[in-house]
Amino acid sequence: MQPSTGYASLVRVSKSPLVVRNGRIRSLLLGRSWSSVKVRDRTKTKIVGATPLVSGDSEAAGRAIREMFTSIAPRYDLLNHVLSFRVDWLWWRRAARCFRPILTAPASHALDLCCGTGDMTFALLRQATGSGVQILGVDFSHAMLARAQQKSAGTSLAWIEADALNLPFPDSQFELVTAAFGFRNLADYDASLCEILRVLKPEGECGILDFGQPHGVVGGVYRLYFRRVLPVIGTILSGVRGPYAYLPASVERFPPPAEMIECMRQCGFREASWTPYTFGIAGLYRGKK
Ligand SMILES: C[S@@+](CC[C@H](N)C(=O)[O-])C[C@H]1O[C@@H](n2cnc3c(N)ncnc32)[C@H](O)[C@@H]1O
């Protein structure tokens, strides 16, 4: 299939992930505008994102998050599969299946934000078999994208190195935007929802897969595992102290479903919803532009 947009052809020909920071490839695109985006009154924002966990300033928070993921990139896939007992694979597949109608429509465009080493992006591609959909993965960690690119040799997937809070795309480009286990790490949830809304086409859909906090007995066991066991195994296997202590802390800080849904609505999403996966250990947020 021929790329139908300027940025797609730009990405397709690149042999290594593109470095796109501070909108440097913006001039090659159609330009951008915030006019179509309903920006929330920040004074009323309850959900602020990962920033306060790291520092008071969202740029410093972004840098810290990027360095953290870069430090674990070499072992990220192994750790993911071990620590989730391979259930992550089922979650990616289940989430991707929800968007099968979009992924099988001819010439649609999908964007997987915070794609890391690309497993959610691959799950999207598997649903899209034969449809000619263009799927882009975006992440701001070069090391994570380098692994995604290695894994995707011979596929139509393309990768862009960019910040999810400042995407190098014009307005209304994608029928689908997803993010798996990455949204929670963003410095400003409101701003990232607005950015997702901006790049979605009208009627386009958003799917955010992330951890939740199950209740009851399952919740108790899960918290014990997440707080006590996971950080120890994660530190041993990755050889890096910190990231796997950050993980449970970030999940505990992440807003509960009702609050996230309200945040999506206020940002301008329609039909915002949450579907729990595996007793609510994870769950999929959905919304439409
Ligand atoms: C937990 S990993 C998830 C990776 C993949 N989606 C998955 O399901 O395995 C989170 C990813 O989000 C990326 N990330 C965090 N904040 C980002 C931002 N502001 N812009 C782009 N990527 C970001 C990190 O670099 C990391 O690769």
Image: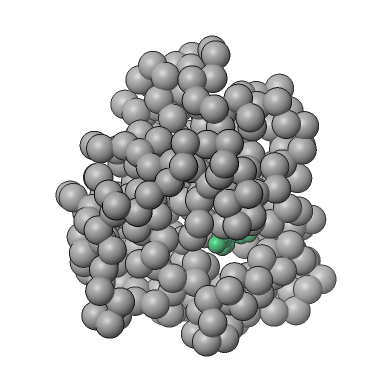
Closest to the observer: 161 or 116? 161
- Residue 206 in sight here: yes
Q: Please give the name of the residue rendered at 68% of the width and 57% of the height, measured from the top-left corner.
A: 141
Quadrant assignment for ligand 1? bottom right
How are the colours assigned in the image? Answer: one colour
Location of the N terminus by quadrant is top right
Whether 186 is drawn above or below 241: the answer is: above
Closest to the observer: 203 or 210? 203
Whether 275 is drawn above or below 42: the answer is: above
Q: Please give the name of the residue rendered at 66% of the width and 66% of the height, measured from the top-left corner.
A: 66
Residue 106 drawn at (x, y percent): 38, 16
Residue 61 drawn at (x, y percent): 58, 76
Residue 270 drawn at (x, y percent): 18, 50
Q: How many marks?
A: 0
Residue 73 drawn at (x, y percent): 74, 57
Q: Please give the name of the residue rendered at 75% of the width and 79% of the height, measured from the top-left corner.
A: 241
Q: Is residue 25 left or right of residue 199?
A: right
Closest to the observer: 102 or 24? 24
Q: Quadrant of residue 80?
A: bottom right
Q: Please give the name of the residue rendered at 42% of the width and 19% of the height, measured from the top-left corner.
A: 107
Q: Is residue 113 left or right of residue 146?
A: left
Q: Quadrant of residue 191?
A: bottom left
Location of the C terminus by quadrant is top left
Residue at the outermost right position: 239
- Residue 137 in sight here: no
Whether 267 is drawn above or below 174: the answer is: below
Q: Is residue 265 left or right of residue 61?
A: left
